[in-house]
Image (cartoon, rainbow, N blue to C red):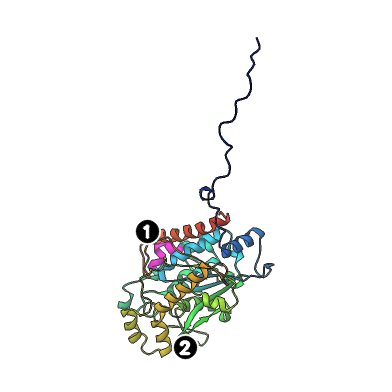
Amino acid sequence: MEHNPGPALPEMGPKPGPAPAEMQPNPEPAPPEVLRALAARARTGSQPLARPDGLRIALVIEGGGMRGIISGGMALALDELGLVPAFDAVYGASAGAITGAWLLSRPEGLRGWAEPAYSRILIRRTAPLRGRPVADIRALIEDLYQTTYPMDFAAVLASPVEFHPLATDAATGESTDLRPFLGGPAELRLALRASAAMPLLAGPPVEFAGRRFYDAGVSESIPYRTALAQGATHLLILRSRRDPRPERDGHHPSRSARLLARTTLRRETPALRAAFLARESRLAADDQLLAQYEADPARTPAVYSIRPAPDSPEVSRLATDGAILQAALESGRVAAHSAFRSCGLNP
C-alpha cells in the first residue's frame, strides 16, 4: 500500500533576515595609503624611473647605533616581500644609512647585524684606553665591509632607487644630504662613515668633500624632512624605537648631553652644539607631527611608520649580546611582514 506523506508541514517562525548592524562583523579596514601604493607597484612590476602613478615614494630608515638592527630587520622583510623596486628613494640616518646601502646591494647582508663578529669589530668598550673610539665605524666600513661581509658599493651607486645618506654639517649643525658627493665607492664609504660618526662614541667628525660631518642623528635622526623637501609624496618610515612614551619630556637635554656639549663638542660651533642639545625636543616634535599625519588619511603627504612591537627586545646603542641582537632583528622583520599582511603580500 502506497504511503501518502500528506501536506507539508508549515515553516516554524519567520525566515531569518539580515543580522542587525551591531551584530554584523566589522569590515576589514582599508590598508594605509602608503602600503596600498607600494603593494600596487609590486603587483604591476613597476620599476624606478618608469612610473605611471606620478608618486614619489621614499623609504626612510631610522638609525640609533646597534638599535638600528631593528630597522635592519624591517628592511630585510621589504626585500623578502619584493618591495625594494617599488621605492623611488631611500633616505638613511646613521645606522639607517648603512641599512639602506645593504638593502640596495646585498640585502642578505643585513643579517650581519646579528653576527657576533660584526659587533666585536664595531663595539670595543676598552678601546678608549688605547686612544680609540668605542664604536669603530672606520673599521666597520673600510675593513669588515670589504672582507668578511663585503658590501657591493658599486651596486648601491648604480641602483635606480636613489640612495640618500644623511649627515650633520659640523660647521652649521644642519642636516646634509650626501648624495651629490657620491662619485665612487670610496666616497660612498666616507659618506656611510660620516652618517654614523656619533660624537664621542665614534671619535672625531669625518672629513668629506672639504667639510666635516657628524652623525645624522645630531640634526635629523628620522630623515623624513629631507625626503619631503625633495618632493616625496609618500613616506614609509622604519623606526628603531618603540612607540614614544606619553610621559617622556622631550624639551630638555639630558645631563649627559649637556656634559658632552661642554666637553667633547666645546671647540665646535655654537650651531652644532645647539643642534646636538635639541635632539630630544626635535625627536618629540617629529613623533607628534608624524602621528598627526598617520591619524588623518586625508592629509598629504601620506605617511606610515613601522615600529617594533611593545614586547620587542630593548637594544642599546652599544649592544653586543648575540641572542638579543638576533631577537631584535627578527622583531623588526616580523613587524614589517605584519604591516603588509593587510595588502595580501606574502614572501
**In the figure, residue 155 lies in which quadrant?**
bottom right
Q: Which residue is drawn at 42% across and 75% down?
A: 284
Which quadrant of the figure contains the C terminus?
bottom right
Taking depth in this image into account, of 107 and 239 the one nearest to the observer is 239
Q: Position of residue 156 (x, y in %)?
A: 57, 71
**In the figure, residue 59 lies in which quadrant?**
bottom right
Left or right: where 230 falls relative to 221: right
Counting other residues with Cα less than 10 Å from the Cα at mark 1, is it few (<14), some (14-19), or many (20 or more)? few
Q: Pointers 1 and 2 in contact (CB under 8 A)?
A: no
Counting other residues with Cα less than 10 Å from the Cα at mark 2, is it few (<14), some (14-19), or many (20 or more)? some
* Kind of residue at disc 1: Ala
Q: What element carries label 2?
A: loop
* Kind of residue at disc 2: Thr
Q: Position of residue 250 (x, y in %)?
A: 38, 76
What stretch of residues is rendered in magenta? 112-120
Cα–Cα span, label 1 and label 2: 40 Å
First in sequence: mark 1 or mark 2? 2
Taking depth in this image into account, of 324 and 345 the one nearest to the observer is 345
From the image, tell me which residue sits under label 1: 323
From the image, tell me which residue sits under label 2: 172
Q: Is 261 contained in the magenta span?
A: no
